Image (spheres, helix red, strand yellow):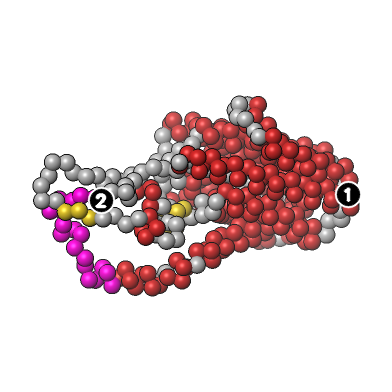
Amino acid sequence: MESRVLSSGATTISGLPRLTRPAGRLNTVTVAVASPASLNTTGGNLIWGRQLRPSLLNLDHSSPVVLTPAKREILKPCAATASESSGDAAEGGFLAKNPWLTTGFFFFMWYFLNVIFNILNKKIYNYFPYPYFVSAIHLGVGVVYCLGSWTVGLPKRAPIDSNLLKLLIPVAFCHALGHVTSNISFAAVAVSFTHTIKALEPFFNAAASQFILGQSIPITLWLSLAPVVIGVSMASLTELSFNWLGFTSAMISNISFTYRSIYSKKAMTDMDSTNLYAYISIIALLFCIPPAIILEGPQLIKHGFSDAIAKVGLTKFVTDLFWVGMFYHLYNQLATNTLERVAPLTHAVGNVLKRVFVIGFSIVVFGNKISTQTAIGTSIAIAGVAIYSLIKAKIEEEKRGLKKT
């Protein structure tokens, strides 16, 4: 996802009691609790793209846990269990010792799915220029995927109440508006140009944080955004595929995703990101269906579907729509999963490199001709985004370090 909704870190796990020291009991035995490092040297167990860290268990590693004699039997080692654990450790030992392989795989799949989505999406618009309908298909395929996953319990569906639903509706609306306007821009101009305009998103985020949320933005962040604005301006002036519909739609998408971030802060929840994104996708789909029917429905029935089928055939038309929706959902989910595995600084660098990959591959695949000034402007804008992301991530890490101390 270009911009993502993150759930706040839960401090406890439902159903897992906090271990405390029983008071006023005799004949107790003291059991030392291992340090976090010895509990899990890989930083946590991966559960559907999430890490379950030892800190989530609310264990007090600075003091022993006192248990009653009645519970001593529970702590007695079992030979069969020990052998099974050693066998499991042996099987997963290689990945446990090399966690960078798993993280690298997540980055690779995130980039790969995003590039494929952008290329396939643009190819569809070349013979089926109906962005409202295609946007609904993107979300619709993802919703079907989520419902299927819930049906088999992978993952288990998290319950939702009316209060949380009210908080998620504004987030989903902004998500839907940003997605639709992005697709209108993709259909109107070159993919590389749309991504260049969307590089301005950090500027809108900083402006919203400063003037709407009242947060103080350091001068260094504002200065790092200067080359982004200059670069996008240079690229827009000489972009061969420029038109106002594509430019305006990309700008509206930036504003929509900015407001999505604002509403997301108010809708922070302990629900895991996979379930949260599923609910947002369902609500966003409900927002996308009416305009697709009202604005494009008559044209689709009259000649839209028939023209597309005549150009590429029914089988290719249906399979293209299915796979573009699947790639859209999976790359957004992989982006969330990747963020949960790495530090914000690493993810910021990865997100900038992803945009470079998309722009580069789209130019090669579609053979888009760009002027020298456009190429220079795009490079300046991407460099500015990289500097901004690095500074912002460093500031966030410093704030996190101060809170821990």
Residue shown at 40% from the left, 72% from the top:
91
Local secondary structure at mark 2: loop
The C terminus lies in quadrant: top left
Residue shown at 42% from the left, 69% from the top:
92
Residue shown at 39% from the left, 42% from the top:
11
* Residue 353 at x, y percent in the picture: 68, 55
Q: Is residue 401 magenta?
A: no
Q: Main secondary structure of the magenta part?
A: helix
Examine the image and state in which quarter residue 231 appears: top right
Estimate how packed mark 2 is, as few (under 14), some (14 to 19) or many (20 or more) residues with alpha carbons within 10 Å.
some
Between the residue at mark 1 and the residue at mark 2, the CA separation in whole angstroms equals 66 Å
- The relative height of residue 268 versus residue 97 in the rendered view (above or below) is above
1 and 2 marks in contact (CB < 8 Å): no
Furthest residue to the left? 26
46 or 310, which is in the foreground?
A: 46
Residue type marked 2: Pro
* Residue 402 at x, y percent in the picture: 50, 40
Q: Earlier in the sequence, mark 1 or mark 2?
A: 2
Residue shown at 78% from the left, 42% from the top:
227
Res. 72 visible in picture? yes
* Residue 135 at x, y percent in the picture: 65, 45
Which segment is the magenta one? 64-83
**What residue is shown with label 2?**
64
Local secondary structure at mark 1: helix
Between marks 1 and 2 in the image, the one whose residue lies nearer the viewer:
2
Res. 70 visible in picture? no
Residue type marked 1: Gln
Examine the image and state in which quarter residue 309 appears: bottom right
230 or 198, which is in the foreground?
A: 230
320 or 154, which is in the foreground?
A: 154
**What residue is shown with label 1?**
373
